[in-house]
Image (cartoon, rainbow, N blue to C red):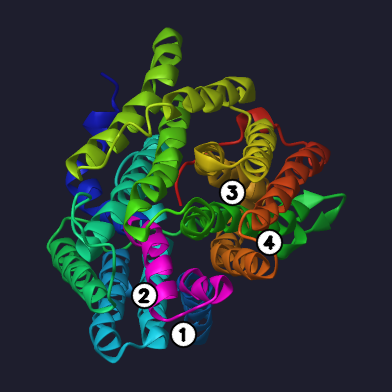
Amino acid sequence: MSDYSKQTNWGQFIPLVTVFFFWGFVAASNDILIPVFKKEFNLSQGQSQLVSLAFYIAYTVGSLIYMFISKGIKQDLINKIGYKNGLIYGLLISASGTLLFYPAANMGSFVLMITGLFIVGLGFSLQQIVANPLSIEVGPKETGSQRLTMAGGINNLGTTIGPLIVSFAIFGSATASNTEASIESVKIPYLILGVAFILVAILLKFSSLPAVTPTNLENTDDKEEGHHKTSALQYPQLILGMIAIFLYVGVEVSTASNLPAYMENSLGFETKEIAPFVSLYWASLMIGRWTGAVEAFDFSLNLKKVLRFLAPYLAFSVFLLVNAIAKHDLSHFYVYGWIILAIIICDILSKGNPARMLLIFSIAGITALIIGMMSSGMTSVYAFTSVGLFCSTLWPCIFALAINGLGKHTNQGSGLLIMMIMGGGFISWLQGTIADATSIHFSYIVGVICFAYLAFYAIQVTKILKKQGIELENASVKNGH
């Protein structure tokens, strides 16, 4: 056994990662709300994507509020209130957003519904700012990336079961005859979620989490061609990386959020039948991240080779288990086990290099989308859901490449990258609008364009970092967002 389990403060880490679960649970559950809201409020596909837009734009608004407050008080807000309090306040903000679902359901107000989601997202933005660095601080820094990898796995567990639980709360069991959803049925699961937020906030209040984490004030020499850099925005790898994060989160979210409309309009599925496929999409990210996480642990080379094949199928078995519990027909999904081989091959070819991984996985994502657009029936569904496999490791790759070489501007650069999470909302809305103008099938061209830029970034950032004398082989990669 490695020193990892002995050194990490599990009493602090376990309550902390519950917030990672919530992020995934709500984000993936939005994909069930979209078709329900679309039908009940008689929305176009573009209008229905305001659900994603409201939720993801909240991350940017929350980050800006945080920056302005910090500037106004001339002190970092989190350092002032403490990391533990920052998490607690974030959870309480999110809880207040879920409370809006009750009057929104009673009034039948779409605006009030997405306002509630926006406030939930505001709370999540504060939690994001705190939880990632705090995950590193609850144990030795050298094992920090391992804890972030584990936290990312918990996040993906939330994305896998979230759609199933919300679908069950709205429609009942998979064998129930109910195929219609009312807005009234939406309020209860979100009120329960609000109570969960409050209970976790109380748990954190009495936990042993550190109140304040020391800020890294390392003053590195970040000269290039004789010029001192005064801002993170002077680094081309960051500027191009911000666009990459925007488009990556965009294609990840839009592929899933437009999937229900495709399955309903083109394949004749009922809304209640779609939840397992949305769950499969988000489980695909879990499959990919568990595959990539093998390198984060101090195992022997031979054991890593074995786990590279076992880890993705272990994650897939989790998906099958939760769907079996939900009494869904599993016969549709066994063929997906063959598709998982694609990500294992891509992972082997990448050799742990973040730029090479970004390029290979982006090309694979383009291939999956084109197959989905050129095919029909379940072949197209599996092609679109497999995009989750190829999105799984892109966040850590882009993040590592974008902040590489920023020196003392690393924290500023990290904050700017987190703001770009808003791409999840804008790209989803764009794809929905294009679907209204053309067809939902053709609208996936948006994802192809996003992946094409990511492939371009992989090539371009390699040249930029090489010019700065930075070795990509040693770039650290951290999973989850």
**What span is in magenta?**
25-53
SS of the residue at dot 2? helix
- The chief SS type of the magenta part is helix
Q: Earlier in the sequence, mark 4 or mark 3?
A: 4
Image point 72% across, 36% down: which residue?
A: 470
Q: Is residue 101 left or right of residue 467?
A: left
Q: Can you tell which mark lies on residue 232?
A: 4
Looking at numbered disc 4 in the image, what kind of residue is underneath it?
Ala
Which of the two discs, 3 and 2, sits closer to the camera?
Answer: 3
User: What distance separates the C-alpha of mark 2 from that of mark 4?
Assistant: 24 Å
Question: Left of 307 or right of it: where is 474?
Answer: right
Q: Nearer the viewer, residue 45 or 118?
A: 45
Asked whether 459 or 37 is in front, the reply is 37
| Among the two numbered marks 1 and 4 on one chain, the one whose residue lies closer to the N terminus | 1
Q: Which mark is residue 73?
A: 1
**Other-residue count near label 4 (Cα within 10 Å), few / some / many at <14 / 14–19 / ≥20:** many
Check whether the beta carbons of the residues at disc 1 and disc 2 lie within 8 A of each other: yes
Quarter placement of the N terminus: top left
